[in-house]
Image: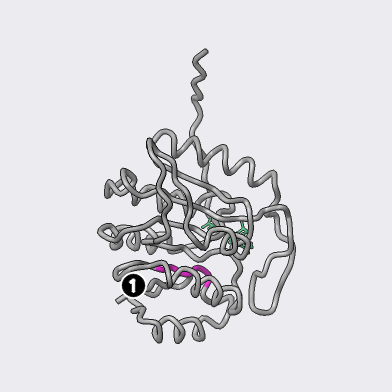
Amino acid sequence: MKISVNVEAELPADSANYEVLAEGVQKAAAVEGLTCEIGLRRGGGSKVIIDALVATNQHLTKPHIAIDPYGNIAYQETDQRTLKLDYTNDMRDECLMNMYLYCRARKVHFCFWNMEDTEFFKRFADGVPIYNESKRVINTYSFVHFDGPHAIAPVQVEIAFFHERTKPGAIFVFDDVNNYDHGAIDRTLKSMGWDLYRTSERKWAYSRK
Ligand SMILES: C[S@@+](CC[C@H](N)C(=O)[O-])C[C@H]1O[C@@H](n2cnc3c(N)ncnc32)[C@H](O)[C@@H]1O
């Protein structure tokens, strides 16, 4: 039985300066490793990342992954504020339906992990298994969008995990840099050999030397 779905994928976004994501993915074209978004919500950020992967033919070799717990749990929106927003499992289900519709049409290899970043770090410290004709365990990242918790402590933990798994030329983009003391993050990154190459109102981008 053939099932054809004739609907447009809807992947709304919630922030601004998404051009910084597209530019970052393009800059990392020659760099080995997965692209990753922490915090998928309704897929708006990943859509921009996927479009940039396709525009530069990187989707032929690089899977895109996303990590998000949903479940309507408390969310660290700023350094001072933790609250429940609308990140429910219904949102997850609607988002994933749309994500896979979008990726299927573009032949993008997308994998989603329904868990917090910290749970992912415990389980995938030795890489993520990717199956496409053969099995590869990939433990390098060419591009990461940090858009989960917006507070210093969890972002520092994320940086420590991904830094070890990047090569020169890799790109990190941070969203909502005004929600927390991004100055502390900026100092950490620079001390680890990351260059700040782009600022905008909401998103700042770094490249590994
Ligand atoms: C600001 S929204 C992401 C927006 C999305 N990146 C975009 O550009 O449209 C934050 C998301 O982070 C998720 N989240 C919350 N805590 C998280 C954690 N510890 N690890 C990963 N994702 C988390 C939330 O469930 C929510 O979907």
Q: Residues within 10 Å of mark 1 (few under 14, many from 20)?
A: many
Q: Is mark 1 within 8 Å of ligand 1?
A: no
**Identity of the residue drawn at 38% across and 67% down:** 166
Is 181 on the left-hand or right-hand side of 109? right
Question: Front-most of 152 and 6?
Answer: 152
Tell me residue 138's x, y (percent). 41, 54
Say left or right for 176 vs 136. right
Q: Residue furthest top?
A: 1
Q: Is 98 situated left or right of 51 in this image?
A: right
Kindly indicate the quadrant of the structure image that contains residue 152. Answer: bottom right
Task: Specify the segment rendered in magenta.
Answer: 172-176
The majority secondary structure of the magenta stretch comes to: strand
Total count of labels: 1
Residue 134 rendering spot, x and y as whole percentages = 38, 39
Q: Residue 148, position in %: x, y?
A: 58, 64
Residue topped by disc 1: 207
For mark 1, give the secondary structure: strand
Residue depicted at x 73% and y 55%: 72
The vertical placement of 140 against 48, above or below, is below
In the rendered image, the vertical position of residue 133 relative to residue 50, given as above or below: above
Q: Residue at x 29, y 58 (%)?
A: 26
The amino acid on which the numbered mark 1 sits, given as a three-letter code, is: Ser
The quadrant where ligand 1 appears is bottom right
Question: In the drawing, does residue 100 fall left or right of residue 62?
Answer: right
- What residue do we see at 40% from left, 82% from top? 192
How was the colour assigned to the protein in this rendering? one colour
Quick check: is 10 in the magenta stretch?
no
Residue 86 sits above or below residue 106 on the image: below
In percent of width and height, residue 122 lies at 59, 63
Report the quarter where the C terminus lies: bottom left
